[in-house]
Amino acid sequence: MADRDSIRYVLEPEDELCHEPDAASNYNESMYFNVFDPRRKIGGWFRLGNRVHEGYAEMSNCIYLSDGRIGFMYGRPKIEHNRELRAGGMHFEVVEPFEHLRVHYDGKICLLDEPLQMANPSAAFKNNPIVDCTVDLDYRGIAPMFGGKPVQADGSEIPVDPEKSFAKAHYEQHVAASGVITIGDETWDIEGFGLRDKSWGPRYWQAVHWYRWLPMNFGPDFAMMISIIGREDGEPRRSGMVLQNGVYTLIEDARIESTWDENWYQTNLRAWAKTKDRQFEVEGRVLSMIPLRNRRKTEAGDSLVTRITEGMTEYSCDGKTGYGLSEYLDQIVDGRPVGPDVR
């Protein structure tokens, strides 16, 4: 294993495009975008992950409406190459690396009055209306890039175990976004802020025991991302960054305390984050929630279940109000999420 102190991160403009896939059967190349309009109280996130060796992409489209409804669509459309991120009606376009990207979607979406029904997706898709949906959003970077591909001090790649990998390279960036979202006969002009990321390399959703991921924006000059990633043994990894006036400051330590409902879905949270300069205290209130899952069967025949709860969240920090996501991933063991903070 590489010495953490000897690792450096490499990121080039061409990394915004698709890479030559690794030989690993579970190679994944994905992009993700979210946006939250603070005036309309509407948000959404959009993801495409090419699993080219497995012959399909993972496509997700999730839109939070101000009245509590959520539109959601997921699919595994077939793909034959990894030359672009375009599948299932969704397309991510790189106009100018690190500066300007576009998200397009033209397809169907399931419109849920009661989004918690998605805990049983087959019933949710069967019992709720499936309507037309289009998304056209322009994304502009308001921050530097955070992350990249970790390499040794001499530039050589760091080996990864495909069975235990979530990604070999990953980067994020806070953004501003504008455009139009249409669901059925309703249309909204969107003007807001969010975060985007990209990763590539071998991925199993079961490679991470649990995590808590809080991307949030308070405007063009103040944003934050808090990440706590837990392992089965050992201390969780606590990281992230704070954006202030166009500059990122790294988070050196963080804690998250959550309030849960009867299904162990987060409803409120308090977070604390420490940089080299100061400490930040954040409060979050989940406005609407959708529970999602990923299932995989191992070669030995064991069934593995990963739950990801996606909450559009209103945040407060330093007297400012912002919006973003609280994304909690847990492996499910004996019917219960494994995160040690779950009560």
Image (cartoon, rainbow, N blue to C red):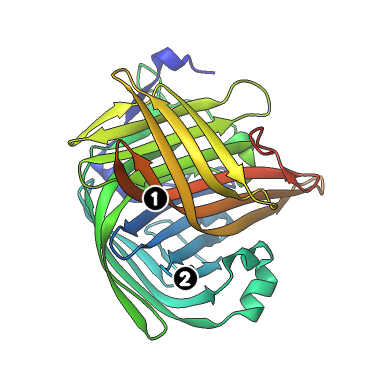
The residue singled out by tag 2 in the image is: 88
Q: Residue at x 32, y 79 (%)?
A: 187
Q: Residues within 10 Å of mark 1 (few under 14, many from 20)?
A: many
- Residue 205 % position (x, y): 60, 46
Above or below for 306 versus 92:
above
Secondary element at tag 2: loop
Q: Residues within 10 Å of mark 2 (few under 14, many from 20)?
A: many
Residue closest to the eye, 308 or 290: 290
Secondary element at tag 1: strand
Q: Looking at the rendered structure, which numbered label has been put on residue 324? A: 1
Q: CA distance from mark 2 to mark 1?
A: 25 Å
- Front tag of 2 and 1: 1
State the image quarter where residue 163 is shown. top right
- Left or right: 198 as drawn, with respect to 58: left
- Residue 308 % position (x, y): 59, 50
The amino acid type of the residue labelled 2 equals Gly
- Give the mark nearer the N terminus: 2 vs 1: 2
- Residue 132 % position (x, y): 44, 82
Above or below for 176 versus 271:
below
Residue closest to the eye, 336 or 165: 336
Q: Residue at x 74, y 45 (%)?
A: 336
Q: Residue at x 36, y 65 (%)?
A: 91
Residue closest to the eye, 119 or 100: 119
Q: Residue at x 43, y 56 (%)?
A: 82
